Amino acid sequence: MLKNLVMEKSILEQILKVVETVYGTYTKGNWIPKPYADNKSRYLWTDAYGVCNFLTLYRETNDIKYLEQADALINNVHDTLGYERNGKKRLGNATDEYPTRGGLRIGKIEDEGSHDGDGQYFHYLTKWAFALSRMAKIKNDQRYIRWAIDLIKAIHPHFVYRDRNDQLHMYWKMSIDLTYPAVPSEGNLDPYDGYITYRLVDELAEERELEKEIADMKSMVDIKYARYRSSDPLDLGEALWITHWYPDEQWAKTITTKSLQALEELWQHGDFQESLNRRLAFREFGTTIGVQVNDKAGDIWKNRINDLHNLWLPHLYKRDKDISPVMFCTSLRPGVVSRHYLP
């Protein structure tokens, strides 16, 4: 797929190199992911993609060690971000058996009282629930679906609220203990993100448990989708990823069309050709993932994806040691993040 990484083996080797750099060398039986470089805290979003990358590697190679690493990363996240910042107590009503019943922290370095501090992000939590659903599907193990449902049940009543006119809305960021909104505005994609994630999780459950939560999300989607707009490459790529799960529904058709139009305008305007110091790699990998999984993106993006991969490859670790290289791996081989990948 890549101009400079033509063979499948070369793509997998590139992914393996990044995975080992970020998470550490595999050791059989007792592997745990290494802490990020420079004492950087763990980001839930990054590790959700990390789990998906390990699962894709497992499917591509049939090597059980990657499934073990995905499992170890899940447990490590639950034992890190499922605890209070001092590490002494699990969040909310969570237990060792049910580690997601208090939600999961973002993993920010700064405490929640600061401008860019720790807390709980809805779009990180849904990304984690999605990763758990892919693990459940591959291992045919309901334990992961239980954890995903517990997570959704724990966070939904705190992020979703009704205004004075009985209209549903969402908070973008909550406090670590979910008692107050840290950022009261609504994320551009949060209702759509919740809608597809809840459905994907519920469809894998032995018994449907998320009907009310799904209905809440659908009501917001139905109101919002006609007004959707964005000029952010990550947001637009995520929109294309979200809509590709249920592509025949009207809200998905509308947002797909708008997202592709907006991305084309950004490309033609030169946003993807600006100096790298004015751009963020992981935001553009959001685009390259989205246009790969969404069937409506067309062939026009193939060469663009190649160019963006090759452009960013020498600079993967310059801004951060985790989110950019991990999302780069997903962009090289979307794998389990695509609805076309798993049976």
Image: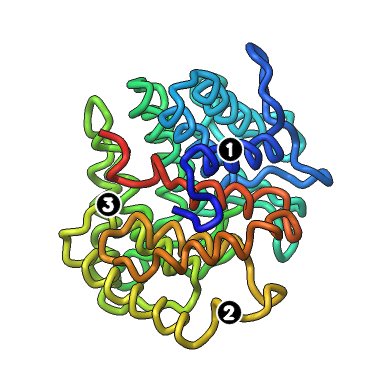
> Could you tell which of marks 3 and 2 lies nearer the N-terminus?
3
The location of residue 41, given as percent across then percent down, is 73, 45
Q: How many marks?
A: 3
The location of residue 7, given as percent across then percent down, is 48, 43
Instruction: State the separation of the CA atoms marked 3 and 2.
Output: 30 Å
SS class of the residue under badge 1? helix
**Farthest residue, direction top:** 29
Q: Is residue 247 above or below residue 26?
A: below
Q: Locate the C terminus and report the quarter of the image it occupies.
A: top left
The dot on residue 13 is 1
Q: Residue at x 43, y 77 (%)?
A: 230
Residue 249 in the figure: left or right of residue 165? left
Tag 3 near tag 2, CB within 8 Å: no
> Could you tell which of marks 3 and 1 lies nearer the N-terminus?
1
Q: Is residue 233 above or below residue 100?
A: below
Q: Residue at x 41, y 29 (%)?
A: 59
Q: Amino acid at mark 1?
A: Glu
> Could you tell which of marks 2 and 1 lies nearer the N-terminus?
1
Q: Is residue 104 visible?
A: no
Instruction: State the separation of the CA atoms marked 3 and 1.
Output: 29 Å
Name the residue tied to disc 2. Answer: 273
The foreground one among 159 and 202 is 202
The foreground one among 272 and 254 is 272
Instruction: State the separation of the CA atoms marked 2 and 1.
Output: 28 Å
Q: Is residue 135 above or below residue 289?
A: above
The location of residue 15, given as percent across then percent down, is 57, 41
The dot on residue 245 is 3
